Image: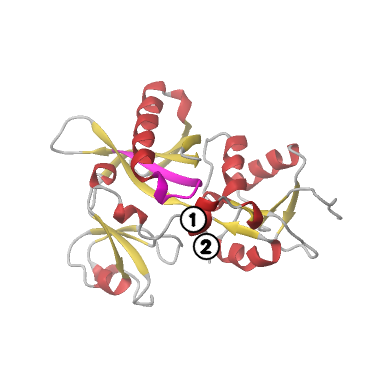
Amino acid sequence: MRIEEGTAVLVMPGRWTSTMELLAVEAAGRGMAVRRAEESGLVGPAHWYGGPVAGAGLADRLGFALLEPVDGWLAELPEEFTGRQVRAATVAEAWALDRPTFVKPPRDKSFPADVYADGSRLPSDLDPVTPVLLSEVVTFAAEYRLFLLDGRIAAASRYAVFGRLDPRPLGTDRAVAAEITEFADRLVAVAGHTLPSAVVVDVGQLLDPYRPGHRWAVVEANMAWFSHAYAADPARVLDVVLRAAGPRERLLPGDLAFVRH
């Protein structure tokens, strides 16, 4: 099907997730053309929602730039925001671990992010120089996904309770929403310059066995163009996705340092 010149295009992989379906409906409602990555004759400029490998392969041809946080972002945050010790390392260093540690790849899914009893439990076929994040083991009572645009929460959703999937719109609990907004504002005030203008930050209620109640902490940061919306407003999620993976010529100067290469 021919796309009229000047029509904005949203490209996604052929196998759609529930988030892709929601974004496709919203994009079409805005007059955008929605196309599958496998279609022939695709031309840019375009926007992308999908995996990093396919996205990187299409970025130059379709003219979009993929924004993402730097690998060591979480490890460089002050502990007042992480609530735990986090450090950037390599797979080789992770193999040498002798105590339970939460280990995850910073950006891809090359191995499952999980608590490993020691380094011997990690896959042995990984490249030793592959970057990883190492975190002390903590318990998050509930986890929330924040889609940030220009340092403000554009859309948000709870996605897990004690590690189990349990999506719920953030607005259903005003007290929690207020606490998260206050925490996000403090985070952006201190570290907003270390994030792209469109990004996902997951936060959680961190339980402390030595203190009553909970405190808020950052779980991780992710690419908006590869993050599940859960129960967040798809219209606002799409706003963030379009900025996070859009035409290269529309890049904001401050986002140049966060373009995936």
Furthest-front residue in this view: 253
Q: Amino acid at mark 2?
A: Arg
- The answer to whether 83 appears left or right of 247 in the picture is left
Report the residue at 52% width, 62% height from top. 260
Task: Pick the quarter of the image with the N terminus.
Answer: bottom right
**Earlier along the polypeptide chain: callout 2 or callout 1?**
1
Element at badge 2? loop
Report the residue at 70% width, 42% height from top. 27
Cβ–Cβ under 8 Å for marks 2 and 1: yes
Picture layout, residue 122 above or below residue 188: below
248 vs 20, nearest the viewer: 248
Say which residue label 2 marks: 260
Residue 131 visible:
yes
Residue 161 visible:
no
- The answer to whether 38 appears left or right of 248 in the picture is right
Q: Amino acid at mark 1?
A: Glu
Picture layout, residue 63 above or below residue 176: below
Say which quarter of the image contains residue 115: bottom left
Picture layout, residue 201 above or below residue 95: above
Say which residue label 1 marks: 68
Q: Is residue 145 magenta?
A: no
| Local crowd size for mark 1, using a 10 Å CA cut-off: few (<14), some (14–19), many (≥20) | many
Q: Is residue 202 magenta?
A: yes
| Local crowd size for mark 2, using a 10 Å CA cut-off: few (<14), some (14–19), many (≥20) | some
What range of the chain is rendered magenta? 192-205
Give the CA distance from mark 2 to mark 1. Answer: 6 Å
- The answer to whether 199 appears left or right of 132 in the picture is right
Q: Which mark is residue 166?
A: none
200 vs 51, nearest the viewer: 200
